[in-house]
Amino acid sequence: MTLALFEKYQHLPMTDSMFVMSILLTFTFLVISVDSATYILASMTTNGSLTLWLVAKIIWGFVMSVIAAGLLAGGRFAAL
């Protein structure tokens, strides 16, 4: 199921370009999602303040990275 999109590309023109575009779009989606989650967690930590501390955002980004790395190490991609 995971490779279905890339298998579909084998039957379409410009396969390599579509591979690169899909990976870039997926990467962009993940970066934006993590940035939003970091912003929300930092906002909740600072009691809903709209002017966030840079340190709070960095700490939450680090915590989320450690959790994701732990899940990947423990259960590979099935954990995520």
Image (cartoon, helix red, strand yellow):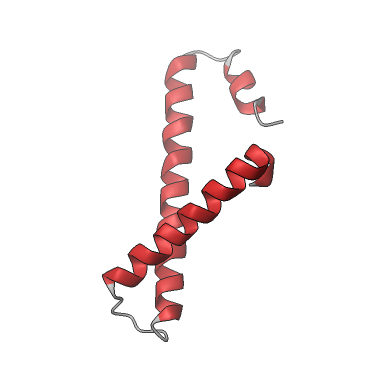
Q: Quadrant of residue 58?
A: bottom left
* Residue depicted at x 35% and y 84%: 49
Q: Residue furthest right?
A: 1
> Along the line of sight, which residue is nearer the eye, 64 or 5?
64
- For the point 57% across and 49% down, the residue is 70
Q: Is residue 56 above or below residue 28?
A: below
Q: Quadrant of residue 4?
A: top right
State left or right for residue 21 relative to residue 74: left
Residue 1 in the image: state x and y as whole percent. 72, 30
Using the image, determine if residue 58 lies above or below residue 50.
Answer: above
Residue 47 at x, y percent in the picture: 42, 86
Which percent across, then down, holds residue 72? 59, 43
Residue 61: give x, y in percent of width and height. Answer: 41, 60
Query: In the rendered view, does 24 fall on the left or right side of 4?
Result: left
| Count of numbered tags | 0
Up the image or down, 29 lies above or below 45; here it is above
| Residue under the image location 45 percent in, 79 percent down | 44
> Nearest the camera: 35 or 64?
64
